[in-house]
Image: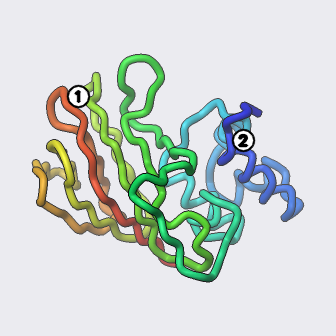
Amino acid sequence: MAPDNELGQHIARLRLERKLSREDLAKKCNCSVDIIASLEEGKLSPSLAPLLQIARALGVHLGNLLDDNPRFEPVIIRKDDFSAPVVRFSGIRVAGDASTLEFHPLARNKAGRHMEPFLINVHPTVSEDCMFSIHEGEEFIYVLEGRIQVSYGSDRYILEPGDSIYYDSTTPHEVRACGEASAKILAVVYTPE
C-alpha cells in the first residue's frame, strides 16, 4: 500500500476485522474486486458512490470509513487546523493525475454522525465530459469562492459566492469549477443508514 493511503488502509483493516476477502466485499457492495484492490493499494482515487456502497457493506457510516478515531464529544475544527489528510475523490481529472475535488473534512472523528460536512477545493477540469455521481442521500452546497457548475440530471446550474443548492443525491449529479479558476465550497452530504 502507498504510505499516504490512509483511506485504503482503513478499508483493508475494516474488511479484515470482518473476516471478509476482497471478493466477499466486492459482492456485498456490488463493486469489482479490482476496484477494492486498487482502493486498498492506493492506486485509485475513490468516487463517492462506491465509497458509500463500501461503507454500507462494511456496516459503518461514510464518516467512519473516512476516519478511524471516533469520539462522542463535539468536534471543533479551528480555521487554521487543516492537518487532517485531504480526501481526493476521483472524477474529471486536471492535468496530470490530480483530482478536481479536494475534500477537507470538518467533522473528522465525530462518532455516530449522519452528515458529512466538507470544505472542498474545486479545481478546473480539462474535459467537458460529465462524470455523474449517483448515491443515496442528499447534498447541500454553499459557494464560498469562485464559480461552480452543478449538473443535476439534464439541468445545469451556475452558482457564485453566496449561492447555494440542496438536492437529492439519487439523481445523477456532478460539481465542477466554471472556467479556468478554482472555487471553494462548503458541502454537507447526508447518507441514510
For residue 187, which quarter of the picture?
bottom left
Density class for disc 2 (Cα within 10 Å; few <14, some 14-19, many ≥20) is: many
Please name the residue shown 37% across and 18% down the image.
95
**Label for residue 166?**
none
Please name the residue shown 28% across and 66% down the image.
140
Nearer mark to the viewer, of 2 and 1: 2
Image spot of residue 89 (x, y percent): 47, 43
**Image marks 2 and 1: residues in contact by CB distance under 8 Å:** no
For residue 79, which quarter of the picture?
bottom left
Foreground of the two, 160 or 139 = 160
**Label for residue 40?**
2
The three-letter code of the residue at mark 1 reads: Glu
The earlier-in-sequence mark between 2 and 1 is 2
Foreground of the two, 164 or 104 = 104
The vertical placement of 117 against 4, above or below, is: below
SS at circle 2: helix
Q: Quadrant of the N terminus?
A: top right
Foreground of the two, 131 or 106 = 106
Please name the residue shown 17% across and 50% down the image.
154
| 75 displayed left or right of 24 | left
Question: Real-space Cα distance between discs 2 and 1?
Answer: 29 Å
Image spot of residue 16 (x, y percent): 86, 56
According to the picture, the residue beneath numbered tag 1 turns out to be 128
Q: Quadrant of the C terminus?
A: bottom right
